[in-house]
Image: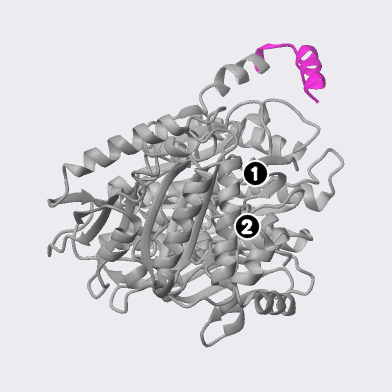
Amino acid sequence: MTYMIVGASSGLGKDLAHEFASNNKNLILISRDKTDLEYLKSDIILKHKVDVKILPADLSSIDDVENFLRSNEKTFNSLDGLLFPIALMTEKDKVLASSLESKKIIYSNFYSITLLINNTLSINKNKKNITIVGFGSISASIGRHVNTFYSAAKNALETYFESLIITTLNENIKVQFYTLGYLDTGLSFEKKLILPKGSTKKLAKIVFSNLNISGGKFYFPFWWKPISLAINILPFSIVKLIVKRFN
Amino acid sequence: MEKVKIQSLDKNYSANIFVKRPEKYRELKEISDRYEKMIPMGSCSSYVPASFCNDNLSILMTKFNKIIEFDKVNKTITVEAGIKISELLQFTLKNKLWIPQIPGYPSITLGGIVATNAHGKSSAFHGTIRQQIKEILIYHKTHGWLNLSKDENKKIFDLTIGGFGLTGTIVQVKLKLEDFIGYNFKTSLIKTNSLIDTINNFNEENKEVYQYSWNRSDNITNLGKGFIFKNEINSIENSSVDTRGLYHDTNKLESNFKFNLWNNFTIKFSQFLYYNFHLQKKNKIFFENFKKIIFPFSGKEMYFKMFGRNGLIESQIIVPAKKINQIIDEIEFNLKKELPEITLLSIKKIKGECNYLRFENDGFCITFDFVRNKKSLNFMENLDSICQNNQLIPSIIKDSRLRLNTIKICYNAYDQFKKDLNEFDNRRIYRSQLSDILEL
């Protein structure tokens, strides 16, 4: 069985690659960092003895994604699943971010993912079983003064995955979506946060064990579920006051 | 970016620092290019402040932990420097290979082992880690990516091994591996009655047997009584170490109790128990698992925590064989005079050649752990004088209290190290509190 992991070279993507490989799954790893991908490939092959293919691609560039899809059409035929543990955050991501900056963030965190899924489902004419796993962010629960386009893109991604779940209800396609709170990754490493960070290794194990669930939405760490619920229930005028206080 | 408060393992130094943890090669380059002063950090479990400096950036390398190349036939492995020694052994031991120069705690990273020229228990037979290193890849803010080996950038290669991370960030290391046929260790004990008796009972190292002593230090009457432990690989074909036991995810050495719990009574009590427990085992051969022998401090973190907020002083010195009797006399004289509280006294043999600031030479390596108080500090002053008068080698990486003057006298190549380091990096970008103490 072969799984494609998009955004595999670090953080959750790297741990997912190890978790799937340790369960004898072959891998296709995608990231823009070719050097890191090559070293990760060696590491996984030496430790787990599975087949690993690497495909460098930059999801923040739509040209790169389209070229990638054109030149790797056959690759998508053989897939048993796709996972998208990809996240691009930048310091310049604010309401007044440049067009170039906001495009990169939206493409990486939303639009390119939809193109890859679209391509996979279009190719899957034999209606074989495929699992698609997306990863959102708790930051999508409310608009923010930082990571503005990131949270908007993650919000769009969540909505897209809900649509995907509903569209594929009667098909052999299993779709799962994880809303992620703080994780112990490079994105959050130097930040002092009010709640503890979740382990990416632990999440990778959960993702693997949930692969057979159809149409599931999950929160990790779990305490973000009631927090997210509270944000959604409360009137925006109150949420606005709370955010103001914490800022 | 917010600052983090950090301490050396001996609790003698603390600092507020910035920490970045790159995970990709691109990120390491970007971070290094953005900051003016920095130092690489591994597990941050050095006794001395080798991986941090107040208000500076420490580059935490723990996410660089991949195995890049493994050649079972030629017994070589290339790994990223942030790999924990326990992770590396988990892989190599499955292939009946290992590196013998292993420090006593499993979360220590390979980069730290290289930067401190670690020696481990087998130093009398295998020498220090320097003997296993074939190639190193570093990233330096001004020099970029540099391959180092005996054939390429040799001077920087020599400066980097035991160079405290001052030549740049160690990113990859290619190691020569040794055979490890067996799955545990065969241990025997020799009872000794004094420090001199201990020295006389060490065997010549023509066989791969790891010998080290544990000697009583709880009172003058018992001084030096103890045991020589001899660990031999239990060479059984078709067997290998159970590597699951080596898994080590957390570093438990970070925080100590509020108060020091080591005093005359607790030292006497613990040493009495330890001595009498092992007395039952003398003249017997027994088997001990790999982890217990190789990582003696894993699971015994309480030992460090009991030193409290003030921490401990650890001292290691190398004494040439021809001077050992005289030096032990001098040490005993000073111990009787100052009566410091010593929690650990141990001796082992070591071999090597001291160059630059590397802790290695042919002779006996004596290790002390002290409670940090006035009596201990007085004794240590006397020990420094003994080192200076006899050109002994004190370990820079163990004793953060060492004065620059002592280091300059004991390390003949101090000036050469400083000159070569400044020639390579005249802006002195990679700095730690240790390098400031050493005026490098």
Callout 2 and callout 1 share a chain: no
Pinpoint residue B136: horizontal percent, then vertical percent: 53, 73
Prevailing secondary structure of the magenta residues: helix
Image position, residue B159 (x, y; %)? 60, 75
- Check disc 1 and give the amino acid type: Leu
**Is residue A45 found inside the magenta-colored segment of the image?**
no
Disc 1 designates what residue?
A187
Please tell me in which quadrant of the rendered image residue B303 appears: top left
| Residue A20 image position (x, y, % from top left) | 37, 48
Q: Type of residue at label 2?
A: Leu
Instruction: Say whether residue B263 is left or right of residue B187.
Output: right
Q: Are marks 2 and 1 in contact (CB under 8 Å)?
A: no
Front-most of A170 and A207? A207
Furthest residue to the right? A96
Q: Quick one: B239 or A61, which is closer to the camera?
A: B239
Magenta residues, start to end: A232-247
The picture quadrant where one finds residue B249 is: top left
Q: Disc 1: which chain?
A: A
Cα distance between the residues tagged 2 and 1: 39 Å
What is the crowding at mark 2: few (fewer than 14 residues within 10 Å), some, or many (at least 20)? some
Pointer 2: what residue?
A: B402
Chain ID of residue with mark 2: B
Can the viewer see residue B139 in this picture?
yes
Q: Secondary structure at mark 2?
A: loop
Left or right: residue B321 compared with residue B14: left
Residue name at image x 45 percent, y 64 percent: B327
